[in-house]
Amino acid sequence: MKIAVAGGTGTVGRHVVAAAEHRGHVVSVLSRPRGVDVSTGQGLKEALTGIDVVIDVTNTMTLFASTARRFFETSTRHLLEAERNAGVRHHVALSIVGIDGMDASYYAGKLAQERAIADGSVPYTIARAAQFHEFAGQMLADAKGPIAIIPRMLMRPVAARDVGAHLVHVAEGSPSIRAMDLVGPRDEVLADLARRQLTHEGRRQRVFELRLPGAYGRGLASGKLRGSGEFRQASMTFDEWLTADDHRPLRR
């Protein structure tokens, strides 16, 4: 099968590419360095010729709802239009568990993306996953100086490698609108993960937990992002991930 991975050089994308190639698929990476820009549609027509499935793991780093909505709606529209014209049979998109009712900040963009996919004409599967083990390190990397302010967040983190393999498994099946959610093996608190990562890496930085206001903050602290109902459970814990090759220590 020929699979195109939008965002194939990112945190999850590189694992999607590796998993797809390991299973014998022909993989094409859609990224700006390769002349494809989903935010403008540049290069999509040529890149999707002959493609069977598109796996979309594109991302944008923003906490502004309007910015997130604009990015995901625009990129999704460009992808679906090009897929329809190229005869792509299956659109697979990564989303986040538990975000229903959290139409704020970054999650507003993911919900907008899901709606755009559902309104499109390409058969699709939305695959929601919990936050990645890498998320704690991303938050720490954004903190400057000896103190890191981490939002109160209840989560059930999953390894990006497991998410990549899950998305390929979904892509190999028929379009099903929604795949079963994927979550990690343990309930965790984001600030605790940050402290454990700092200890493991021998870094001296104090972590303070702050409950954010508004709908976004309430959602983070509510436990909704741990998922509910039926789900697939990945096996790699956060502490196992810290000692795995996937873990890239923070730059000093």
Image: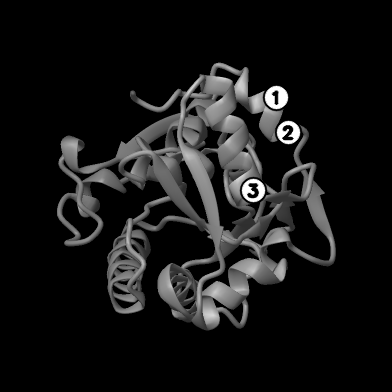
Question: Which residue is identified by label 1?
Answer: 240
Question: Could one spot residue 164 in this view of the protein?
Answer: no
Above or below 148: residue 26 = above
The answer to whether residue 203 is left or right of residue 224 is left
Which residue does the image show at 64% across and 36% down from the upper left?
A: 162
Q: Residues within 10 Å of mark 1 (few under 14, many from 20)?
A: few
Disc 3 element: helix
Marks 2/1: CA–CA distance: 5 Å
Q: Check the image and tell me how it is coloured.
A: one colour
Q: Nearer the viewer, residue 227 or 187?
A: 187
Disc 2 to disc 1: CB gap under 8 Å = yes
Earlier-in-chain disc, 3 versus 2: 3
Disc 3 to disc 1: CB gap under 8 Å = no
Q: Residues within 10 Å of mark 3 (few under 14, many from 20)?
A: many
Classify residue 35 by image quadrant: top left
The answer to whether residue 137 is left or right of residue 6 is right
Classify residue 141 by image quadrant: top left
Numbered disc in front, either 3 or 2 = 2
